Image (cartoon, helix red, strand yellow):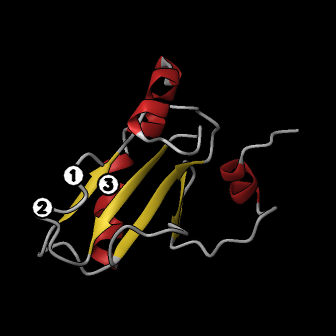
Amino acid sequence: MCDCIFCKIVKGDIPSPRLYEDENFIVIRDINPLCKVHDLIITKKHIKSVNEIEKDDEKIFASLFTVAKKIAAMENMSESGYRVVVNSGKDSGQAVPHFHAHVLGGEDLKGKLQGM
């Protein structure tokens, strides 16, 4: 039994409204947002971090930024700007050991979220 919170969200064991879903990713709002818009792009496949990505996973990650672009458009951030951030490992601040990317924006982020 996987004890990963993101795996449980992907499976639907923990309810979390999905902003977007495709064959490789789900997108949810971060439960502890760091700015006005803070969404998470989560892989459906359990991959702990960037360091765990294998050659066979390239197909999954080929569309990551296309998903980020869609989310930015859905959140009305395409023109004003946004960040896409991936943390890898505990020292980076990765809180959940399951690959996810943060899509951040909805406000002026200059000078904010340094070290994210």
Reply above or below: 87 against 34: above
Query: What is the CA distance from the residue labelled 3 to the residue labelled 1?
Result: 25 Å
Q: Could you tell whether 94 is left or right of 74 in the image?
A: right
Residue drawn at 33 percent across, 78 percent down: 36
Query: What is the CA distance from the residue labelled 2 to the residue labelled 3?
Result: 26 Å
Query: What is the CA distance from the residue labelled 1 to the residue labelled 2?
Result: 7 Å
Q: Are marks 2 and 3 in contact (CB under 8 Å)?
A: no
The amino acid on which the numbered mark 3 sits, given as a three-letter code, is: Thr
- Could you say which quadrant of the image residue 17 lies in? bottom right
- Quarter of the picture holding the N terminus: top right
Q: Position of residue 99 (x, y in %)?
A: 52, 40
Residue 111 circle label = 2
Q: Are marks 3 and 1 in contact (CB under 8 Å)?
A: no
Residue drawn at 18 percent across, 72 percent down: 78
Q: Could you tell whether 23 is left or right of 12 in the image?
A: left
The amino acid on which the numbered mark 1 sits, given as a three-letter code, is: Gln
Q: Position of residue 50 (x, y in %)?
A: 44, 29
- Mark 2 lies on a secondary structure that is loop
Residue drawn at 39 percent across, 35 percent down: 92
Reply above or below: 92 against 8: above
Which residue is identified by label 1? 114
Q: How many marks?
A: 3
Residue 66 circle label = 3
Q: Are marks 1 and 2 in contact (CB under 8 Å)?
A: yes
- Mark 3 lies on a secondary structure that is helix
Residue at the far top in the pictured view: 55
- Mark 1 lies on a secondary structure that is loop
